Amino acid sequence: MTLRTIAIGDIHGHAFALAALLNAVDPKPNDTVVFLGDYIDRGPDSRGVLQQVLTLSDRCRVVPLMGNHEEMLLQARRNRHSLPMWLDNGGDATLRSYDSSEELEGIPTTHLEWLSSLQRYHETESHFFIHANYAPNWRLDQHDSKTALWLPLTD
């Protein structure tokens, strides 16, 4: 039985803040921590954030979701023409955290594979979690990237 479900979003490379938050909530083995994406970019330690999220699964159940910043990195990896857009949106800080300048090859394969495995949403009997938005007239598994990862919630 799950004791608590804890949702955390938009860490953006702030490993120190994530460590402080996790210390404060102190997840237990029966807790679930749902990460809503945007682990990387902008902040000084994206690498440290990913390491914390990866190792947290030794302590509790972790449900990591995709954010638009992860999608930008993966797009830049598939298509080098997308690299400038990612770099301009904080990707440069992510690369610096891996001691790399403009080379995606500096990011460990394990981190890239983990980022590639992220889901767009998580659903329980009583809640669903998604990075940005949902269309109530669509099934969750039919949401496109633009809606699920980019569009802000509107009235």
Image (cartoon, grey):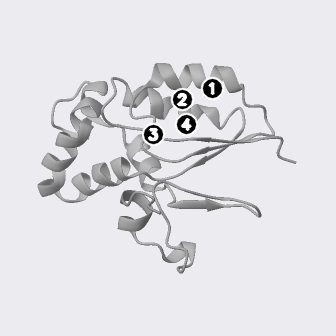
1 or 2: tag closer to the N-terminus: 1
User: Which mark's residue is nearer the viewer, 1 or 3?
Assistant: 3
* Marks 1/3: CA–CA distance: 14 Å
Classify mark 3: helix, strand or loop: loop
Badge 2 crowding class, 10 Å Cα cut-off, few under 14, some 14 to 19, many 20 or more, is some
Classify mark 2: helix, strand or loop: helix
Whether label 1 touches label 2, CB < 8 Å: yes
Whether label 3 touches label 2, CB < 8 Å: no
Identify whether 19 is placed above or below 136: above
* Marks 4/1: CA–CA distance: 13 Å
Question: What type is the residue that disc 3 sits on?
Answer: Asp
* Marks 4/2: CA–CA distance: 5 Å
Judging by the rendered image, the residue that carries numbered circle 4 is 54
* Marks 3/2: CA–CA distance: 14 Å
4 or 1: tag closer to the N-terminus: 1
3 or 2: tag closer to the N-terminus: 3
1 or 3: tag closer to the N-terminus: 3
Give percent across and percent down for residue 120. 50, 61
Question: What type is the residue that disc 1 sits on?
Answer: Leu
Judging by the rendered image, the residue that carries numbered circle 1 is 22
Classify mark 1: helix, strand or loop: helix
Judging by the rendered image, the residue that carries numbered circle 3 is 10
Q: Which residue is found at the position 39% from the left and 35% from the top?
A: 12
Whether label 4 touches label 2, CB < 8 Å: yes
Question: What type is the residue that disc 2 sits on?
Answer: Gln
Q: Tell me where residue 61 sits by quadrant.
A: top right
Question: What type is the residue that disc 4 sits on?
Answer: Leu
User: Which mark's residue is nearer the viewer, 1 or 2?
Assistant: 1
Classify mark 4: helix, strand or loop: helix
Give percent across and percent down for residue 78. 24, 59
Judging by the rendered image, the residue that carries numbered circle 2 is 52
